[in-house]
Image (spheres, rainbow, N blue to C red):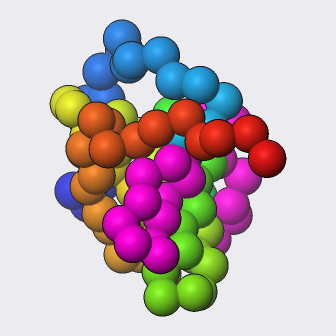
Amino acid sequence: MRFALLCAAVLAAAPALAEEVVASNGNDSVRLSNAPCTNQQVLNLLEPKLRPALRDASAVVQGQLFKACWVVHGDAAHLLYEDGDQGLIPLADFKIPKSA
């Protein structure tokens, strides 16, 4: 499982993040949290020893909400979604959201 190998290779010295950051492309967005991933559907896709490395995430694509978990991979966030789909987004694309 490629994602399992990626998780095992996550850098120990990940860049510091605010509690939440957001990357947007038009109306679509991905929100990364520093909180541990609690989405059981995503966690069930991984070996138990890899689960503690994942952080919580969500995405809104074409108005639909998707839950995910993520890890740092080099200079990108590697996301794993509930349906097993994966994605990479450069960390530089993420910004601290404006307070409401």
Q: Residue 59, position in %: x, y?
A: 53, 67
For residue 8, say whether it is visible: no
Residue at x 42%, y 52% (from the top left corner): 23
Residue at x 66%, y 30% (from the top left corner): 19
Residue at x 74%, y 39% (from the top left corner): 99
- Is residue 82 shown above or below 3? below
* Image quadrant assignment for residue 3: bottom left
The question of residue 10 being in magenta is answered with: no
State the predominant SS element of the stretch in magenta: strand
For residue 31, say whether it is visible: yes
- Is residue 16 shown above or below 46? above
- Residue found at the far top of this picture: 13
Residue at x 48%, y 59% (from the top left corner): 30
Picture quarter with the N terminus: bottom left
The question of residue 40 being in magenta is answered with: yes
Q: Residue 8, position in %: x, y?
A: 32, 34
Q: In the visual, does 100 lie left or right of 76?
A: right
Q: In the visual, does 36 lie left or right of 1?
A: right
Q: Which residues make up the magenta segment?
A: 22-42
Q: Nearer the viewer, residue 47 or 60?
A: 60
- Is residue 67 shown above or below 92? below
